[in-house]
Amino acid sequence: MRLRFLCCAALTILTVAGCLGPQPSPTPTLPVQRPTLTPTSEPTWTPAPPPTATPEPAPTATATAIPTASLTATPPPPEWIALYGAGSEQAPRLHALVGDGSRRDLEMNVYRGATVSGSGRWIASPSSFPSAASVIITDLQDETVYVIDAREGWGIYDMAFDRAEARLAFLELAPAQRNVPWAIVVVDLADGTTARFEGTTRPEAGVYPGNPLAWASAGRELLLGTFLPYSDGLYAGVQALEIPPGTASAPVDALEQRTLIPGGEYRSVPHLPPDGARLLYLARDPNYMPADYTPALDFAVNQLWTLDIASATPTMLVEVTDGDALGGDAAWAPDGERILFARGHYAGMDWGSLALHVRDGAGTVQELAPLPLAEEGTGLRLAWCRPDVALAVLTAGPDLTQLHAVDVETGDLELLTSAETLFVLGCVQAP
């Protein structure tokens, strides 16, 4: 059945700076807001005041947890499709896309870098953007809230729930300095206790901080997209870090770690399918240059790859060699077999044309629908939430992004909303 939304939404484009060079500028912890689940009219957003001071780094961590209720909730409504944040950059609001065409304003602020657990029960968000001094973790059903503070002067970045919805991991990064310290912090959602796994950036030894991407299917390996902090370099590689059970802290060097994708061999944030067993990512043959491409920064890709996590074996699924290029994102279908991606032709720095395609499990590729491109639009994010429903986010100018619903059966696109800041936290798994 074709999805029809009467609601509004929006999503910010993926930027390399967001993954490769975060700039800590901590702001005070925002007050926790309790969500409600009643539909509302179009929301209004009140910008938060800019930060007025940057604390000096402290030698000790200050992690606290504040539980406010027991963990006895049932999952969120099964008709939820996805959760997204939309509004001003200073105060985006959290919304749910619902399968019957309605929208629910959950009456809380979230910031870029926020994420949702698989069932939609848990939300985790930095307390501000672009850097935050704490992460706010909320159970949308029984209103349990944990506020986890970073070490003073450090910033909190990307985060990921495990597949059992028992733990959350996030990156904590120190201010710019020689051999930047960092930590992976793991929160136990049963009681809000934390374990810290601290490291120090050592490029000569191949040791880098990493943004948590997801947890692998086995449940103990945390996948990290590593980078050289405070630089314009490309991705430093995808690492699988084995996180021990319990809340005992340890140095990162004491944990088992293995390389899944070497640095420089991919140019997109990898995605996992529902089974958590494979990575999906984009790359480029270094000897290939798309036709009519004149970039300020070279982010073009022409290959789509998958990688088996257990064996670290890569397989190329799609390669473009006729002058076209692939869009900057791809998404697994809920069945873990089909893949949604975009292919098009450049016209200077921006796309001249770009269309969605679907590759099935047998390797057959079919064009689905052209994307409506703005004159200055170049960014694309994709999410495939239900068998017939996908989401596409496009830039629509320097200060505006658009969220589209894609009917994967017919190829029809429906504009849901536009906003200054818009980001999809994630799809909600159908029961």
Image: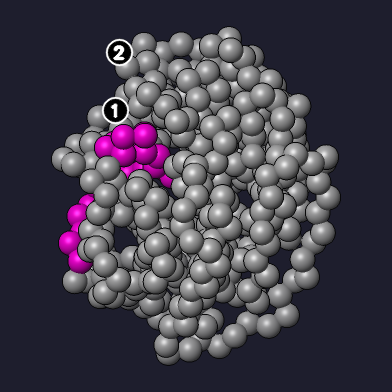
Percent x, y for residue 182? 39, 73
Percent x, y for residue 338? 39, 21
At a point 66% along the width and 53% down the height, the residue shown is 35
Look at label 1 and name its amino acid.
Answer: Met
Q: Earlier in the sequence, mark 1 or mark 2?
A: 1
At a point 70% along the width and 40% down the height, the residue shown is 104
State the residue in front, 104 or 325.
Answer: 104
Percent x, y for residue 334? 42, 27
State the residue in front, 8 or 21.
Answer: 8
Q: Which residue is mark 2?
A: 362
From the viewer's perspective, is 219 left or right of 20? left
Q: Which residue is mark 1?
A: 316
Instruction: Look at the image and tell me in which quarter the N terminus lies.
Output: top right
Look at label 2 and name its amino acid.
Answer: Ala
From the viewer's perspective, is 38 left or right of 343? right
Q: Where are the magenta residues, as a range?
A: 255-280
At a point 19% along the width and 71% down the height, the residue shown is 254
Dominant SS type (magenta):
loop
Q: Secondary structure at mark 1?
A: strand
From the viewer's perspective, is 92 left or right of 308? right
Where residue 246 sits, quadrant-wise, is bottom left
Q: Is residue 216 magenta?
A: no
